[in-house]
Image (cartoon, helix red, strand yellow):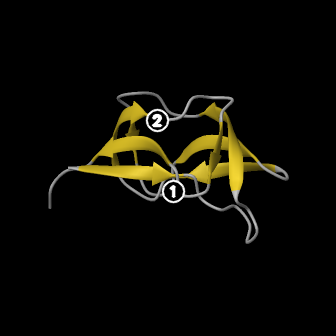
Amino acid sequence: MQEYILMSAMYPTMTSGKIDKYLVGQGDKVAKGTAVAEIISEGYFTLLSEVEGIVKEFYVGEGEYVEVDTPLIEVEIDAP
């Protein structure tokens, strides 16, 4: 089963952000609260995972700008 880590709004009026750097790699295990990316948008922010599982695929490259709620990382999770 897959879940996605999305570009989250780091502040109430944020509409987009730039992926400065990923802090995880393909195959890494992430838990809720794991720092997964550094985001630039009216400041410098750390994006935290809201899901737990194994990083399978990146949909957005470093240096790219995307809208809030865009899927960034596919995470494979264990079925309950």
Residue at x-position 65% and y-position 32%: 21
- Residue 74, percent across and down? 37, 42
- Residue 52, percent across and down? 35, 52
Residue at x-position 46% and y-position 50%: 5
Residue of label 2: 59
- Residue 44, percent across and down? 79, 47
- Residue 22, percent across and down? 58, 33
Type of amino acid under label 1:
Gly
Q: Tag 1's secondary structure?
A: loop
- Which disc number belongs to residue 33? 1
Residue at x-position 46% and y-position 28%: 25
Q: Quadrant of the C terminus?
A: bottom left
Type of amino acid under label 2:
Tyr
Total marks placed: 2
Q: Earlier in the sequence, mark 2 or mark 1?
A: 1
Q: Tag 2's secondary structure?
A: loop
Decide: few, some or many residues near mark 1? Use Cα within 10 Å; few <14, some 14-19, many ≥20: few
- Residue at the extreme bottom: 12
- Residue at the extreme left: 80
Q: Distance between the Cα atoms at labels 2 and 1? A: 20 Å
Seen from the viewer's position, the closer of residues 43 and 78 is 43
Q: Is residue 6 left or right of residue 20?
A: left
Q: Is residue 32 above or below residue 62?
A: below
